[in-house]
Image: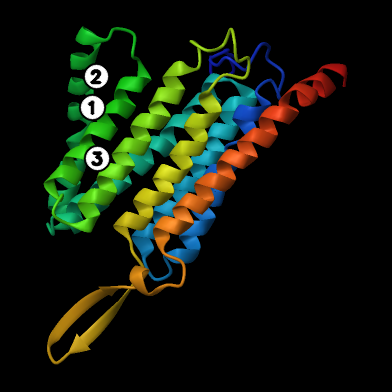
Amino acid sequence: MLQEQVIAYCERTDFAYWGEPVNAVTNAAFVIAAALVWRQTAGLPLARAMAVVLAAIGLGSFLWHTHATQWAGLADVLPILGFILLYLFAATRDYFRVSGLAALGVTLLFFPYAAGFGWAVSLVLPGMGANALYLSVAVLIAGYGLWLNDRDTGKGLLIGAGLLVVSLGFRMADDAVCAIFPIGTHFMWHLVNAVMLGWMIRKHSPRAVWLFSGLSVYRVSLWTHTRTPPAFKFCRFLTRAVAAVGRMMRRSGSLKKAIATA
C-alpha cells in the first residue's frame, strides 16, 4: 500500500521519477531558506531546530514529487506537521511568556482545533481536503498577530498569515489552470511557503544580544543595526526566487522532452 503511486498534481502525467521536474526542483527553496535562517540564528537552539525541520520539509516534498508514492506522501506531510507544532509551542511560550508546560498544552489543542476547523469549512466549502488544515494554520497565525498587533511581532505574524494565504491560493489553483498552464501552479506553493516559513522563524527569533545593567537584563534586537535591513533581504530573496521560477518555466519544456527521449 505504501508503494502505491498516485498522480496528485497537474504537472505529473505519468509515474516517471522526473514526472514533476518543476515541482521537484523548487523544493530547493526550503533548503535555501533553512540555510539562511541557520546562519542568522546562532545561539538560539529552538530557532535552529525550526531551520532543521524546514530543510526536512524540502527533502520530504522532493521525495513526494519524484516518487509519488504513499510513503513519500507521509515524508511530505510529517515535517510540515512537525514545524506547525514546534512553532506553535515556541510562539505560545515566548510571545505570551507562559511556562513550557502551558505552551505544550496549547500545542496539543491544535489537533482538535484543526479537526473542528476542517469540519466547519467542509460545511461551507466541500472538498477542501488538506487545504482546510493549511487554512486553519493561517487563521491561527492571524489570530496571534491580531492579539499582538500593538507590537512589531504582531505585524510580522500578519504578514506571515498573508503569505500563507497567497501560497494556499496557488496550491488550490493547480487543477483549475492545468488546461492552459501544463506545469500548474503548485511550484509557487513551494516558493512562497519557503519565504513565509523563513520569515516566520526570523520573526520569532530576531538576532539579539543581552545587555546587563546592574541586576536588570535587557534584550536588544540587532535587526535595526545591521547593514541590510531584514525587509530588504526578504524582498531580494523573493525577487531572486521569482526570477529562478521564470528560468525553470522556460526550461521545463526542453527538460521534459529530454527525459522522454532518454
- Nearer the observer, 75 or 114: 114
Left or right? Give the position of 94 relative to 35.
Answer: left
User: Which amino acid type corresponds to the residue marked 1 in the rendered image?
Assistant: Ala
Which residue is outermost to the bottom?
A: 214
Crowd rating for badge 1 (residues with CA inside 10 Å; few <14, some 14–19, many 20+): some
Q: What residue is rendered at 36% in x and 20% in y?
A: 130
- Nearer the observer, 223 or 109: 223
The vertical placement of 172 against 238, above or below, is above
Residue 242: assigned label: none
Crowd rating for badge 2 (residues with CA inside 10 Å; few <14, some 14–19, many 20+): many
* Residue 73 x %, y %: 50, 25
* Residue 55 x %, y %: 51, 47
Left or right? Give the position of 159 relative to 33.
Answer: left
Residue carrying label 2: 118
The residue mark sitting in front, 3 or 2, is 3
* Residue 70 x %, y %: 52, 20
Residue carrying label 3: 141
Residue carrying label 1: 114
Marks 3 and 1, Cα distance to the nearest angstrom?
13 Å
Badge 2 marks a residue whose secondary structure is helix
Tell me if label 2 and label 1 are in contact, CB under 8 Å.
yes
